[in-house]
Structures are given as structure tokens and as C-alpha cells.
Image (cartoon, rainbow, N blue to C red):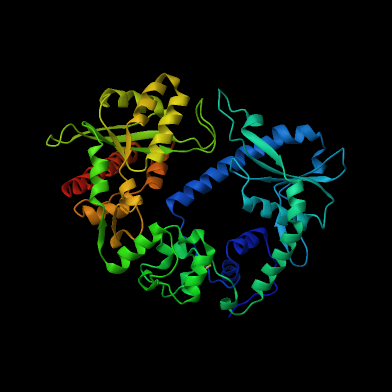
Amino acid sequence: MNTQSHDKISKSDFIAFLDAPRHLWAIKNNRLTPIEINTFLEHLFDQGYNVEKYAEQYIQEVLIPEYNMAPDNVLLQPTAKDHEFEARADVLILNPQTKKWDMYEIKSTTEIKKQHKYDVTFQSLVFGKQYELGDVYILHLNGEYTRNGELNLKNLFARTKVTGIVSELANEVQILRYNALDVISEHDYNQVPSCIRPKQCPCIDICHPDLPDYSIYDINNITASDKKVRQLENMGVFSIDEVPISFTLSDKQKAQVLVAQNRNVHIDIDMIRKDLNGLHYPMYFIDYESFNPAIPMYDGYKPYDQMPFQWSLHVRRSKDSELEHYEFIETNITDPIVGFLEALTKVLGSEGSIIVWNKAFEGTQNKRMGEIHPKYNDFCEEMNSRLYDLMDIFRDGIYARREFKGSYSIKKVLPVLAPDLSYKGMNIAEGATAMISWNEMVYGTLPDVKRQQIKADLLAYCQLDTLAMVKIFEVLEKLL
Ligand code: SF4
């Protein structure tokens, strides 16, 4: 065993410890499987770099001039360490009034998260030994900022003073960081607590080498309750098939366990009939793809606002009519929602139901698009009044099968209900890749042939999403 008990605890070690003490143990013992940088993570990293770039500009152009200090009294990315801990801050500035060092930490979010508070408290404990610290700030994106013309750096960022929070958390973090030190000197990982969320586990071999294919962690929302998961683990129950019938679960969780254990299909025909009978022809099956830049690219947008850039629409005008298909994708460097909505107004009639999968997404985008471009506000509101969410039937367990494994994602439901349609083999087969590919196609420097390929892949992907809805709808319809 390769336990490195002399290692210092860095800030990222401490964050890993907060996530799950066993993650820290795995890092220090080289047992963490390097995470595959999937497209979604890649996108998050890109967003983070982009925010950092603008934050550095803000520090130079707004923050430092405000302090009016000589360069010697501004430390960019300083490090500090003692015998046990080490940290790197984003900026330290000597405050001319207090003669103390104010510390700034950059975060790419629009709000301060719980983890950020622990993170800056850790920093200030380490830096506090070497510097006389004054106030501590988190520099983050201002969620209220709306772009209007050139980027306004001063308004794009917000500075939140967290000095009080840091003082409140200091004792707790002090104890926690010594607990983290204990973890790295532990030889047996079984003595180190694990998490209750192993579904995207970075070192499954040390925690759950034999995790069943359908496990207790797949039970809907079960990880919201530490107590329930720990009870099951302590009983040695890891497979959903072994959950005792008498075990306390919510109605929805119980229904999922029963369907799994009885290997049957639960279909509430009356509910499905009620839902489908409430729909009107023509039926519009629609799906959007969108990109959410951290730094707003066009007027009217706030940080992280989605920019819907593509839609696919299948139309069923009556029960027996031929299925029609329409689509749109913005390929030029321009605010995509103008073309997006303009094209949609031409094919979406004023009557009939608009069927989506996860109306929270399309509904929110409609609302924001109407706000950003008030000319389309009535159209967007009218669309929202006609939305029907096909996903609800699966999310609410009205139709449940063991094979869904408690998921109501269209990617899980489609292969079970309409196995002849598949996302397999597609160049673009999920939303994060669609988003990144579109950004590359429009704003990158790809050769034209590659851009054309991406366009074709995006169109095929979005079209399959709406066709999948139609096929799932037909399966439900045949039950009635
Ligand atoms: S189960 Fe996986 S994710 Fe959880 S602590 Fe263990 S290694 Fe980490």
C-alpha cells in the first residue's frame, strides 16, 4: 500500500475530502481512476477558463485601480503553506486603509455555493498564518447583469464579502482539515467513509467492486436521504432486488422497487387515457438544442442564459395523416433565437398541442426568448400555454418497467419501447455534444467540410429526438 502520510493537504484535496473522505484517500493512494473528460466536462472547463480570462481583466482594470496600490502590494496567484496545508489564492491586495491583505477568490458561478464557503475558509486559514488578512471576497459572475452593447466588466462581475462567513466556519474547517489529514495517514480505506452516490464513481473498484447492475442507488431520489441509504448498506442490501418490502420508502420509490422485484410492467391505463385524450390535433412534437455561454454573447442575455439554436418538429395533423417534419438550425454568427423563432412562427399553427419531453426546459426557454426579444413574447407565451410534457407519464411512474431502471430520460425509454429506433452509431448522440459541436461549427475555425458534417449530424440528432417522442406516443396510444 502506498500511503503518503507526509503529504500536505491542498485546497483541491480538501474539496475531495468534503465530497467523500474516501476520494481523498483514493487520490493520495493513486487509486482514483482518471476521469474521462467527457464533452460536458470539457464544456464546463471551457466556461471556467473563459470566466477566469474576463475576471483577470476585471482585476487589472477595475479592482486594482480601486485600491490604488503599487504593483508590489498586489499579489496574483500567491501561494502559502505550512507544515501540513498549502493553498493558492487568486489575488491578495494590501488595503491602504486597513493595512491588511484582502483576499479574492474567483468563481465562475453566478451565486456562492456551500462548497465555495468551505473552500475560501480553508484558503484563509492557510494564508492567515503568513499574511495579516483583512476581508475575504468571492468574485463571481453577476446573475443580474444583462448585456447591452460592449461587455461592461464592472457590472459583469459581483464581489461578495464573505469575511463573516469565513469567521463562522473557521473552527469547523479547522477540525475538518485535521480530519482530512487523518484520512491520508489511514492504511485501510474501509476505515474511511465513502459517499452514497456511486453512480458516477471515479474508483468503483475500491468501494463497490460488485455493485449490481440495478442497485439501491438507482432508486429514485434515494440519495437525498443519507439515512435510508446507510440503513440499506448496513443491512448488506445493495441490489434493488433485495430491498425488504417492509423497508420505509416513498410511494414512488416503493412502486419502482415493486416493479423491479416483480419484473412486471406497471401501466395506469386510465391516467394515460386521461392525459392523451386531453391533447388536440394538430399535434406538434418539438425539441430544442441550446448553448449557454457563461459570458453573454449578445444583447439581452444574462450569464449562462441558454441560446436555443436549433429545433426539430414532427407534426401529426390527424390520427391517420402522414407525419410531417420541419427543422431549423442557425449556422451564422448572430443571435440564434431571432432566426429560431422566425422560422418557428411559419410552421407552428395557432391550434393544437405542443408535445415536448421535459417541459421545464422548453418552457423556460420560451419564456426567456420572449423576454429577450419582446416582439415574440406573445408567440412564446402562447406556445407555453399549449405545452404537454410526454415525460410526465414516465417520471410519475404511470408507465413503469424494470428496464427503465427508474430513469425517465428519453434515451432510456426509447430503446425499451421502440427498439427499432436508436441513438447508437450517431456522431452526435446527446445534448452536451450537440451544444459543443454547434459552438465549434459557428464560432470555431473548422474547414467547411467539417462544418457541413456537424450541421448534418446535429439535424439528424434533433430529428431523432422528436421522432422518438412520436414513436413513444404511438406505443402509448396503442394501449388505449
Ligand atoms: S462510492 Fe465511488 S464515488 Fe462514492 S466514495 Fe466510493 S469511490 Fe467515491
Q: Position of residue 117 (x, y in %)?
A: 67, 51
- State which quadrant residue 187 falls in: bottom right
Who's the residue at 29% across and 56% down the image?
400
Q: Nearer the viewer, residue 262 or 291?
A: 262
* Quadrant of the drawing holding the N terminus: bottom right
Name the residue located 66 percent from the left edge and 36 percent from the top edge.
158
Q: Compared to 443, does 471 lie above or below?
A: below
Q: Nearer the viewer, residue 325 or 113?
A: 113
| x, y percent for residue 21 | 60, 67
174 vs 70: above or below: below
Residue placed farthest to the left in the image?
320
Residue displayed at 41% across by 23% down = 377
**Please, which residue is most extreme toward the top here?**
375
List x then y, in percent, for residue 346: 28, 23
Is 199 left or right of 422, judged from the image as shown? right
The answer to whether residue 428 of the structure is visible from this angle is no
Q: How many marks?
A: 0
Q: Quadrant of residue 82?
A: bottom right
In this rendered view, identify the residue nearer to me: 123 or 417.
417
- The relative height of residue 31 versus residue 103 in the rendered view (above or below) is below
* Residue drawn at (47%, 65%) of the image: 198
